[in-house]
Image: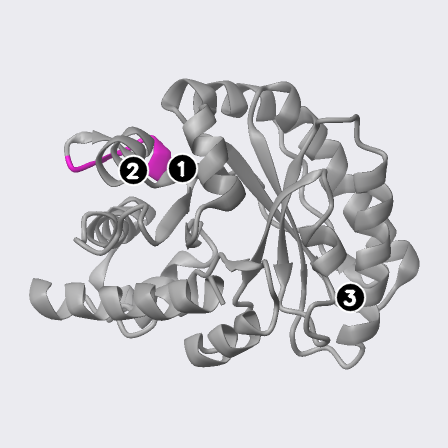
C-alpha cells in the first residue's frame, strides 16, 4: 500500500472495475461475453478463457487510472501475468490502476435472512501473498436477503472481524454486505444495515479505515453519513444485477459514491468483436460509469 495508491483511492475521480468473477460466476460471465460452455472442456480451460477476457479489458487503451482508479482481481488472476508482468504489477505500473484482491470463498446457505461468508482457511497466507504481489486491498462479499436485524448484525460483524485480519496485514479491506435488489423489504434492510455499519465504524481505532461496497440504495443519499465517516476511505457501489444504464442513473443520485461494477462494466463486450470494436465498447462503458461516479 503506497501513499500514491491511498491518495488515489481516497479522492481519485473515477471508479473501481470488478474483474473478480470466480468459479461459480465464470460460466455466466463467459456466456455474456459470447463464449458458451461447449467452448471449454475443463475448469482450467474455462479460467484460461476468462483470464484472456480480463487481460483484453486491462490492456485496452481506455483502461487507465485516469477513469478506472482501481480493479478487483480474482486470486487466479493475481497469480497470472497481463502484458508480460504479474497482473497487479501491470495494473499499477503500466495503467495506474490500484489492484485489489477478492478473498472470500463464497457464501454459506441462507439463515436468518442472510448468507454469511464461508470459512477462509489459509487467509493469512493469501494475504501475505497479496502483499508480496503488490495488492493494495481486499474485497469480501456476503449477502442480505431480508430486513432481519439479527441476521444483518451477524453479517456485518463477520465482515468487520475479517476486515481486522486484513488490516493487520497492511491491506485495505473492502467490506461488501450486498443487499439483494429484488427483495420486498430492501429499503428496511438498508436502514438496518446503515445502523450496523455505523456502529462498527464508530468502534474502529482512531485513524483506521475501511472501504465499503454497497448495493445502490432505494433512498438516494441514504449512505451519505458513511461517505462522510472518518473511518471510511471510500464508499463504492455494486451494480447488483441492474443494467448499466439503470445502475449509472441510480449511482448519479448518490453523491460521493463511486461505482465498482462487474457485469455492468462488461455489458456489450464480446469475444467475437474486433479489437477496434471491443476497445470502442469498453471505452464507452468506462466513460458512462466514470461520468456517473463523479456526478
Question: Measured along the vertical axis of the image, is residue 221 above or below residue 90?
Answer: below
> Which residue has dot 2 on it?
91
> Which residue has dot 3 on it?
190
Q: Tag 1, which secondary structure?
A: strand
Q: Residues within 10 Å of mark 1 (few under 14, many from 20)?
A: many
* Residue drawn at point x = 47 percent, y = 24 percent: 1
Q: Residues within 10 Å of mark 2 (few under 14, many from 20)?
A: many
Distance from Cα at disc 1 to Cα at disc 3: 28 Å
Q: Tag 3, which secondary structure?
A: helix
In the rendered image, which quarter is residue 214 located in?
bottom right
Q: Residues within 10 Å of mark 3 (few under 14, many from 20)?
A: many
Distance from Cα at disc 2 to Cα at disc 1: 7 Å
Magenta extent: 76-83
> Which residue has dot 1 on it?
99
Q: Is residue 29 visible?
A: yes
Q: Position of residue 242 (x, y in %)?
A: 51, 76
Left or right, 227 with respect to 44, comes to right
Q: Are marks 2 and 1 in contact (CB under 8 Å)?
A: yes
* Residue drawn at point x = 51 percent, y = 25 percent: 126
Question: Measured along the vertical axis of the image, is residue 280 above or below residue 130?
Answer: below
Left or right, 291 with respect to 278, comes to right
Q: Nearer the viewer, residue 239 or 148?
A: 239
Is 46 inside the magenta-drawn segment? no
Amino acid at each position: 500500500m503506497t501513499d500514491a495508491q491511498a491518495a488515489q483511492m481516497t479522492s481519485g475521480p473515477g471508479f473501481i472495475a470488478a474483474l473478480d468473477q470466480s468459479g461459480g460466476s465464470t460460466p455466466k460471465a463467459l456466456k455474456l461475453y459470447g463464449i458458451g460452455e461447449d467452448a471449454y472442456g475443463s475448469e482450467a480451460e474455462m479460467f484460461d478463457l476468462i483470464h484472456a477476457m480480463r487481460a483484453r479489458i486491462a490492456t485496452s487503451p481506455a483502461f487507465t487510472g485516469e477513469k478506472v482508479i482501481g480493479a478487483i482481481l480474482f486470486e487466479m488472476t493475481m497469480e497470472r501475468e497481463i502484458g508480460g508482468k504479474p497482473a497487479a504489477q501491470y495494473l499499477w505500473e503500466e495503467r495506474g490502476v490500484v489492484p485489489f484482491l477478492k478473498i472470500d470463498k463464497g457464501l454459506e446457505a441462507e439463515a436468518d435472512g442472510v448468507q454469511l461468508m464461508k470459512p477462509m482457511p489459509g487467509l493469512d497466507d493469501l494475504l501475505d501473498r497479496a502483499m508480496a504481489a503488490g495488492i493494495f486491498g481486499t474485497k469480501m462479499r456476503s449477502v442480505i436477503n431480508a430486513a432481519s436485524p439479527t441476521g444483518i448484525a451477524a453479517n456485518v460483524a463477520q465482515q468487520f472481524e475479517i476486515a481486522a485480519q486484513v488490516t493487520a496485514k497492511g491491506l485495505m479491506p473492502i467490506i461488501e454486505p450486498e443487499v439483494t435488489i429484488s427483495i420486498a423489504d430492501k429499503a428496511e434492510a438498508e436502514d438496518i444495515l446503515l445502523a450496523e455499519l455505523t456502529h462498527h465504524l464508530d468502534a474502529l481505532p482512531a485513524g483506521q479505515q475501511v472501504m465499503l461496497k454497497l448495493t445502490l440504495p432505494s433512498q438516494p443519499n441514504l449512505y451519505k453519513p458513511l461517505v462522510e465517516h472518518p473511518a471510511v476511505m471510500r464508499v463504492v457501489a455494486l451494480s447488483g444485477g441492474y443494467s448499466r444504464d439503470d445502475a449509472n442513473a441510480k449511482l448519479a443520485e448518490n453523491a460521493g459514491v463511486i461505482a465498482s461494477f462487474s457485469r455492468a462494466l462488461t455489458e456489450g463486450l464480446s469475444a467475437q468483436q474486433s479489437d477496434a470494436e471491443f476497445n470502442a465498447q469498453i471505452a464507452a462503458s468506462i466513460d458512462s460509469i466514470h461520468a456517473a461516479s463523479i456526478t
